[in-house]
């Protein structure tokens, strides 16, 4: 064979997966010495990668990180959360001398799992930060498990020595926020987020725990993080409840808008976006520091880039009332 063979050819000759070949070339941990030896023997025998390039990869001198942002155009969205996260990430990368590129989900939506890994490798990226990940994003999951890449996931749980997570305690944050407006035995409407969202599950868990502890008369509706869906839910049944707990500020804005101005129904949100100060003042929310989360995600990615193992990074939050 010649140097024109691909990574799949090397994998086949060595009897391993393409992801394992990539891990060996990047000197990742978790690969046995026997496997590493077999892969490098094939690499050297076939000339797949010149020794000088292999050496550069092994030393892991690459300082480029990809920031993957998931944007769903089919639902109502706001820019503040993404922009604060991106700003925090880029400021931290600049401070640490790292090169950060931004990739949106539309850039890879037509690619297979293997093509997605190839896309990132072709841009000289072996460390990806994923923001806005949901449970159905197979491509990003593949990068960590089979694609031979480091991965930092924000607001999601994935396992692996090459995977770090960065998030607040969404379950406790929802519990403490809802507790501010829910009294013992009260009738409560909980408007949850997307069915495929990691944060939706975590926040729902916190709400269910509070309902059990305070013996709440709880009704759950799916708002899918949409202001308009929350508006319709509350418009039809909002006055039946003592409190309305929303799994996002955007839904809280919709809920508050649907209630009469003189309504005594209490409303809470989640995230702490500034829009709440103008559109739904005096609403309790769980405020997240998205700038700090972006910065922490880059710090976690840099540790992986230097050969560290994955870790769970917990970010502080605050329960506060948004007011003008």
Image (cartoon, helix red, strand yellow):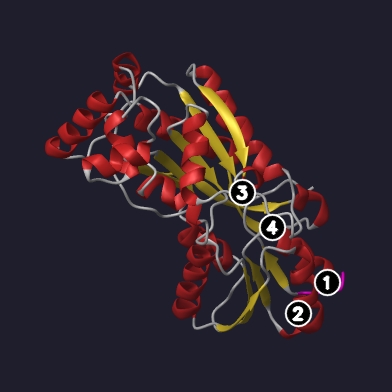
Judged left or right of residue 41, residue 198 is right
Tag 1 residue:
258
Tag 1 near tag 2, CB within 8 Å: yes
Between the C-alphas of marks 1 and 2, the distance is 8 Å
Residue 198: x and y, percent? Answer: 50, 60
Q: Relative to 20, is 181 above or below?
A: below
Q: Which mark is residue 238?
A: 2
| Callout 1: SS | helix
| Callout 3: SS | loop
Q: Which residues are magenta?
A: 259-264
Tag 3 residue:
70
| Callout 4: SS | helix
Residue 277: x and y, percent? Answer: 77, 50
Between the C-alphas of marks 3 and 1, the distance is 29 Å
Sequence order check: which comes first, mark 1 or mark 4? 4
Question: Does the rendering let one see residue 162?
Answer: no
Between the C-alphas of marks 2 and 3, the distance is 32 Å
């Amino acid at each position: 064979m010649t140097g024109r063979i691909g990574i799949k050819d090397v994998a086949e000759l060595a009897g391993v997966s393409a992801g394992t070949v990539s891990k060996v070339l990047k000197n990742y941990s978790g690969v046995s010495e026997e496997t590493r030896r077999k892969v490098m023997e094939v690499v050297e025998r076939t000339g797949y990668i010149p020794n000088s390039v292999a050496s550069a990869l092994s030393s892991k001198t690459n300082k480029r990180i990809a920031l993957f942002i998931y944007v769903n155009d089919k639902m109502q969205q706001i820019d503040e959360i993404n922009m604060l996260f991106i700003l925090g990430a880029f400021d931290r990368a600049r401070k640490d001398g790292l090169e950060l590129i931004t990739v949106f989900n539309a850039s890879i939506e037509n690619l297979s799992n293997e093509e997605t890994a190839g896309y990132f490798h072709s841009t000289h990226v072996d460390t990806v930060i994923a923001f806005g990940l949901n449970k159905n994003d197979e491509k990003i999951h593949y990068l960590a498990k089979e694609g031979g890449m480091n991965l930092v996931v924000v607001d999601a749980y994935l396992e692996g020595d090459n995977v770090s997570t960065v998030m607040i305690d969404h379950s406790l944050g929802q519990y403490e926020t809802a507790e501010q407006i829910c009294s013992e035995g009260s009738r409560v409407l909980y408007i949850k987020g997307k069915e495929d969202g990691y944060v939706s599950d975590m926040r729902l868990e916190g709400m269910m725990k509070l309902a059990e502890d305070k013996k709440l008369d709880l009704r759950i509706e799916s708002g899918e993080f949409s202001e308009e869906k929350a508006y319709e839910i509350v418009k039809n049944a909002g006055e039946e409840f003592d409190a309305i707990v929303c799994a996002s500020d955007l839904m809280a804005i919709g809920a508050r808008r649907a209630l009469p101005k003189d309504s005594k129904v209490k409303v809470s949100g989640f995230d702490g976006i500034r829009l709440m100060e103008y559109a739904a003042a005096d609403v309790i929310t769980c405020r997240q520091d998205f700038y700090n989360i972006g910065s922490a995600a880059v710090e976690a990615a840099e540790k992986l880039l230097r050969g560290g193992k994955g870790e769970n990074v917990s970010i502080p939050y605050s329960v506060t009332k948004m007011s003008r």
